[in-house]
Image: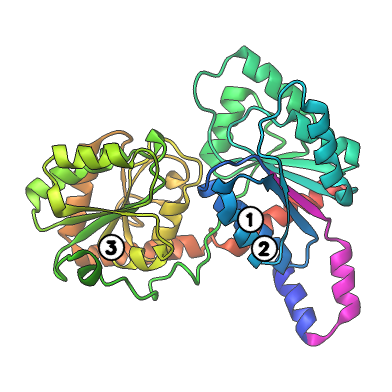
C-alpha cells in the first residue's frame, strides 16, 4: 500500500498515534517558482501543492505576485495551500541583498525541511539557494521541466556545476530530459532522478461527457475532428506544423475539422497561416478553455506536434482520456507511445508525417478506439497523479534523512 493510502486508512480507522508517527517522517516543503506565465510547469506546481496538502505535508508555495499567474495562486488558495507572493520585479545587482532577505524570511518556517525549486531553464536560482541556506533549509531539490535549450557552452556547464553543489537532487520529468541534462550540462547522474508528471485520472477519463461540437462550433456530428491543446506562445510547441498538416489532411479528407485549444501571442500568426493554407472555417481556434477534459473526449484524433518537450501534459492527458494520439517523438513520448499500439509516433518537424499518420488513424476508427484504450492503460500504469506524488515524496524523505 502506498504511503498516502496508508495514512488515509489510518485516518479512517481513527489511529491518531499512527497518523502522528507518519507525519513525523514528513518533512515540511517549500515550493519556489519564478514563473511569470501559466503553462505546464505551473499546472505541475498546482498539482504538487494540492497533493502535498492532501497528504498532510506542511507546504507553502513561494511565487510572483504578477497578475499573469493569478490562476496559479487562486488554485492553490482553493486547495488551502499557503501562498507567499513576492515582488514581481526582476532582481538587479542593487536589489540582490533585499531579495535574499525576503526569500530567507519566507523560507525560515521550513528550517530542517525541503526547498523544491521550479524554474524555467537551467540557469539562475543562486539567490534562492543562498536564502535557503541562510534560513536553515535542510535540503534543496530542483525540478527541470525542459531539456537544455539554445547554445550550451563551457560557461553554462561551469555555472551549473557550481550551483548544483547546493542541490541534493535534480528531478527530471522524463528519461530523455535526464539524458540531455547529463550529456549537455555535465550534471551529476547520481543526483539526477526521473519522476514523471502525473495526470488526474478521474478528471481526464474516457467517461467524461464530450462537449457538443455542433452546438458550439457548427461541426457536423459525422465530421471527424482532429485537435490539439497547447499554449500558443512558443514555437517549440510546433503549432505551425499542426496547421500545415491540417491543410494536407483537408486536401485528402475535406470533411475533417480541426480544433485548436489554447491562447498566446502566436495565435494571430497561426490564424493567418491557416487562412493562407486555405483551411477557412475547417479550423477553429477555440482559445483558452476550462473544460479541456470534455474537449478531449470530443476528438477523433489528438495531435501533439511539439519540436522539443520534457514531459508534455497535453499528450498524457489525451492518452488518459482514451484518445487515439499522433505525436512527435520528443519529451516523454518515447516512454508512452509504442507506434501502432498506444498511439502513432512520427518524426519531429515533419507535417507530412503528421498528416499521413492522422489520415491512417481516421481511416481505421475501430483500431483507433483500441489504441485509445491501450493509451489509457499506459497512463494508468505509471503516470497517475498519485504516482508522481509518491515519487516526489520519496525524494523528499531521502534527502532529509540522507
Q: Could you tell me residue 37's position as x and y percent? A: 53, 43
**Distance (Cα) linking label 2 and label 3:** 32 Å
**Distance (Cα) linking label 1 and label 3:** 31 Å
Image quadrant assignment for residue 98: top right
* Residue position marked by numbered label 1 in the rendering: 73
Which of 40/193 is in front? Answer: 40
Mark in front: 1 vs 3: 1
Whether residues under marks 1 and 2 lie with C-beta atoms below 8 angstroms apart, the answer is yes
Q: Which corner quadrant holds the N terminus?
A: bottom right
Mark 2 secondary-structure assignment: helix
Q: Is residue 97 above or below residue 346?
A: above
Q: Answer few, some or many: residues within 10 Å of disc 1's Cα (few below 14, many 20 plus, some between 14 and 19).
A: many
Which of 302/294 is in front? Answer: 294
Q: Could you tell me residue 22's position as x and y percent? A: 85, 68
Marking on residue 77: 2
Say which label, 2 or 3, has the lower sequence index.
Answer: 2
Query: Can residue 196 be seen here?
Result: no
**Highlighted range, magenta:** 13-32
Q: Answer few, some or many: residues within 10 Å of disc 2's Cα (few below 14, many 20 plus, some between 14 and 19).
A: some
Q: Is residue 148 left or right of residue 8?
A: left
Q: Answer few, some or many: residues within 10 Å of disc 3's Cα (few below 14, many 20 plus, some between 14 and 19).
A: many
Query: Residue at the spot x=49%, y=22% of the render?
Result: 150
Which of 82/57 is in front? Answer: 82
Mark 1 secondary-structure assignment: helix
Amino acid at each position: 500500500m502506498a504511503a498516502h493510502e496508508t495514512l488515509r486508512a489510518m485516518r479512517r480507522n481513527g489511529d491518531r498515534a499512527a497518523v502522528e508517527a507518519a507525519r513525523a517522517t514528513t518533512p515540511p516543503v517549500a515550493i519556489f517558482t519564478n514563473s511569470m506565465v501559466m503553462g505546464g510547469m505551473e499546472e505541475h506546481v498546482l498539482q504538487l501543492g494540492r497533493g502535498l496538502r492532501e497528504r498532510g505535508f506542511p507546504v507553502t508555495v513561494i511565487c510572483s505576485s504578477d497578475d499573469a499567474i493569478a490562476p496559479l495562486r487562486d488554485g492553490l488558495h482553493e486547495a488551502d495551500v499557503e501562498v507567499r507572493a513576492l515582488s514581481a520585479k526582476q532582481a538587479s545587482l542593487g536589489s540582490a541583498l533585499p531579495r535574499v532577505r525576503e526569500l530567507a524570511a519566507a523560507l525560515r518556517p521550513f528550517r530542517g525541511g525541503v526547498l523544491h525549486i521550479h524554474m524555467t531553464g537551467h540557469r539562475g536560482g543562486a539567490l534562492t539557494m543562498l536564502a535557503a541556506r541562510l534560513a536553515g533549509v535542510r535540503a534543496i531539490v530542483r525540478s527541470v521541466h525542459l531539456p537544455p535549450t539554445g547554445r550550451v557552452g563551457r560557461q553554462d556547464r561551469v555555472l551549473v556545476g557550481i550551483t548544483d553543489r547546493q542541490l541534493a537532487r535534480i528531478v527530471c520529468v522524463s528519461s530523455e530530459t535526464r539524458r540531455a541534462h547529463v550529456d549537455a550540462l555535465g550534471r551529476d547522474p547520481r543526483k539526477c532522478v526521473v519522476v514523471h508528471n502525473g495526470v488526474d485520472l478521474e478528471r481526464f477519463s474516457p467517461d467524461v461527457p464530450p462537449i457538443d461540437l455542433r452546438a458550439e462550433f457548427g461541426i457536423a456530428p459525422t465530421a471527424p475532428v482532429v485537435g490539439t491543446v497547447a499554449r500558443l506562445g512558443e514555437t517549440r510547441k510546433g503549432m505551425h506544423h499542426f496547421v500545415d498538416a491540417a491543410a494536407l489532411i483537408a486536401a485528402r479528407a475535406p470533411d475533417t475539422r480541426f480544433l485548436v485549444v489554447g491562447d498566446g501571442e502566436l495565435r494571430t500568426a497561426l490564424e493567418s497561416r491557416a487562412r493562407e493554407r486555405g483551411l477557412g472555417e475547417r479550423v477553429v481556434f477555440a482559445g483558452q478553455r476550462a473544460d479541456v477534459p470534455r474537449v478531449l473526449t470530443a476528438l477523433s484524433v489528438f495531435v501533439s506536434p511539439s519540436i522539443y518537450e520534457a514531459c508534455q501534459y497535453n499528450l498524457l492527458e489525451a492518452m488518459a482520456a482514451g484518445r487515439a494520439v499522433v505525436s512527435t517523438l520528443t519529451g516523454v513520448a518515447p516512454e508512452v507511445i509504442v507506434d501502432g499500439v498506444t498511439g502513432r509516433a512520427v518524426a519531429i518537424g515533419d507535417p507530412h508525417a503528421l498528416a499521413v499518420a492522422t489520415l491512417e488513424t481516421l481511416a481505421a476508427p475501430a483500431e483507433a478506439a483500441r489504441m485509445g484504450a491501450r493509451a489509457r492503460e499506459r497512463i494508468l500504469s505509471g503516470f497517475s497523479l498519485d504516482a508522481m506524488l509518491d515519487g516526489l515524496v520519496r525524494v523528499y524523505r531521502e534527502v532529509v534523512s540522507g
